[in-house]
Amino acid sequence: MPYERFLMKHVGVPHSTALETYRADGGYDGAARALRMKPEELVDLVKKANLRGRGGAGFPAGVKWSFLPVGRDVTYLCVNADESEPPTFCNRVLIENDPHLLLEGILIAGYATQSTVAYVYMRGEFMEQFHILQKALDEAYAAGYFGRNILGSGYSLECYIHRGAGAYVCGEETGLIESLEGKRGWPRIKPPFPAVEGLFRKPTVVNNVETLACLPPILTRGLDWWLSLGTANSKGPKMYCVSGPVNRPGCYEAPLGISVRELIYGADFGGGMRAGKKVKAVFPGGISMGALRGDLFPPAPEGVVDPAQDFDELGCVLDFDDVHRYDLLGLGTAAAVVVPEDVDIRELLVNVTRFFAHESCGQCTQCREGTGWMHQIARRIRDGAGRAYDLDLLTEITQNMGLMPELSICGLPDGAAWPVRTLVQKFRREFEARIMAQMPDAVLRKAQAVNPAAYDLPVLQGRATSYAGGTFFVADGT
Amino acid sequence: MSWRTVDRRTVADDELGPGLSDAVKDKIRTFFPRYPTRRAALLPALHVTQDALGYVSLRAMREIAELLDLPPAAVLDVVSFYTHFWTRPKGRKVIVLCRSLTCELLGGRAVLEALQKRLGIGEHQTTPDGEYSLMTEECLAACEHAPCMLVGERLHQRVRPEDLERILADAENDKLDVPRSDLFDAPAAH
């Protein structure tokens, strides 16, 4: 049976953002059903569904909700629509095409957590999407889905859209909370976790757009349908993004657990590479989750997965578990960017390190300095002045930043280190070949280009040799 | 003789730039009921200010601080963190070019070079006639349409160097074609 889309069922439908279109095929039924349940039942249902957060970390949403303290008076729900991980765009597609699906998800999550106010934190660059969602929200308010006493249940929820202003780190949940409070988007030290003390020092739940959009189908199509999708520990549908030089770049909904090869070559997905090129590398979960080798490399023997060897890794299944076997940080946002065979791996490293050097918020030293140094080393290698030691140096830097060695406040440095580490490990032969092929005096030339004044000494210009003739040495035979 | 002290820190009143009109202040006040603290209305206030004035002037920062019961330094602190806000006048339209991975793989750099040549300015500069400012940004979250370019509020997709003339010749190239909510007005013309 072909998979029937839910999250993207209105993509491409005319007037898909209007409330009538959404209600015509059962919109807001899930919310109506949820409001007849007890909040605890709803939390249990989402726990049973094992709905794991779609924003990157994959933390189960129901478990997150159950961390809220009992007997609280005010709870805030924050919706993370600060989608800024390159190359992710599924939230944008969802908001543009089906804003009411998100709003229904907000209503269900708001009721389950007994939130009083929901804030949608939307990145500043989303202008069109802001107006689309705000229009939809106005419609939903007018139809009684938000405000006081929603659908006669006695539950009240206000919803506001808060526009960000261009900062990757505001996608981190405590960074988002700080930014919402009108401060710099600097992540907070945890604990206390937001569920205990978050926005305005009240219990707060932060959920991703896609996570919330998964709630209505759990209620309308039922738990059995939901659990029939996906793999062992990864249930439900996922919006996969694929971009780069493929024939059909875009966002595609599928049950969790399709392979990277299918995402690139499948006729329902990426549709193959442009001009029949081969894949050199793929970042399958957003750039911070690390890279896979493409089919430019020889296929691995049947059943062998060994990231230490140069095998084709496109067989990686995109769910929450299999990615770890390929030395990736996690599923991330399941947004793949495909790198074709003719791209210089050094350019790739420069681009990736620049992103994190630009977006590090600057609170923790190893992230602020480390991302900058990695970018400088990457630039040096790209400019043809790399040193053989640079690759080990990069690896060493990546091991000394982030949450995993418990050095930082948030996970940004882990995400910054992982792609560098996997790129250096998996494409080490190419890096080494590039460094070997450099001109012997490349390092000196590069240094000279950076700071010509220091190299303007006569001794370095070859002028000192003119003294060798007659001044210091006595001529022969006199 | 006595020493004459020179105050080099306080900016002279005529260098503080434009202030907020009453209409803008009222618009900022409409955001207050949404949040339990005044401070949380800071980002909306800065958006409204930048849309009205073109940038966030020092005088505007002071006035926002007064409205929100904050020290002016707290406003400057926030303004300087977010890349969206300008502390000096910018061009009438800001061109933001994506430089992230997908856009770069699909020719974003050629677009940037063509654009620099066409406008005669470098990155983070403004044309002499004050029409365009050119910026590069990280991912604009429209990678399926790479390379992408934001002119004002409007996203231009799959931009090739030869498309630039057509886009720049269009006077409406920064206008959204979706119905606007009246919460945030379109940036005012200067």
Image: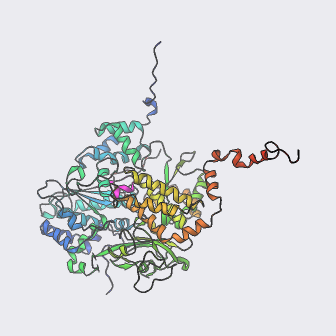
> How many marks on residues?
0
Relative to B147, say whether B17 is above or below.
above
Q: In this image, A80 relative to A380: left or right?
A: left
Residue A241 lies, in percent from the top left, at: 40, 71
Residue A322 lies, in percent from the top left, at: 35, 76
Residue at the limit of the structure toward the right, as seen here: A478
Residue range of the region highlighted in magenta in the rendering: A161-171
Residue B154 lies, in percent from the top left, at: 45, 58
Residue at the limit of the structure toward the front, as seen here: A477
Relative to B104, say whether B9 is above or below.
above
Is residue A9 shown to the viewer in this render? no
The residue at 65%/47% (across/down) is A455
Residue A224 within the magenta-colored segment of the rendering: no
Q: In this image, B43 relative to A345: left or right?
A: left
Q: Which residue is more in the foreground, A44 or A94?
A: A44
Q: In this image, A320 relative to A275: left or right?
A: left
| Residue A135 location, quadrant | bottom left
Relative to B23, say whether A200 is above or below.
below
The residue at 42%/50% (across/down) is B84
Q: Which residue is more in the foreground, B178 or A241?
A: A241
Residue A33 lies, in percent from the top left, at: 16, 71
Look at the image and name its color scheme.
Answer: rainbow
Residue A166 within the magenta-colored segment of the rendering: yes
Is residue A227 shown to the viewer in this render? yes
Relative to A360, say whether A222 is above or below.
below
Q: Which residue is more in the foreground, A167 or A378?
A: A378
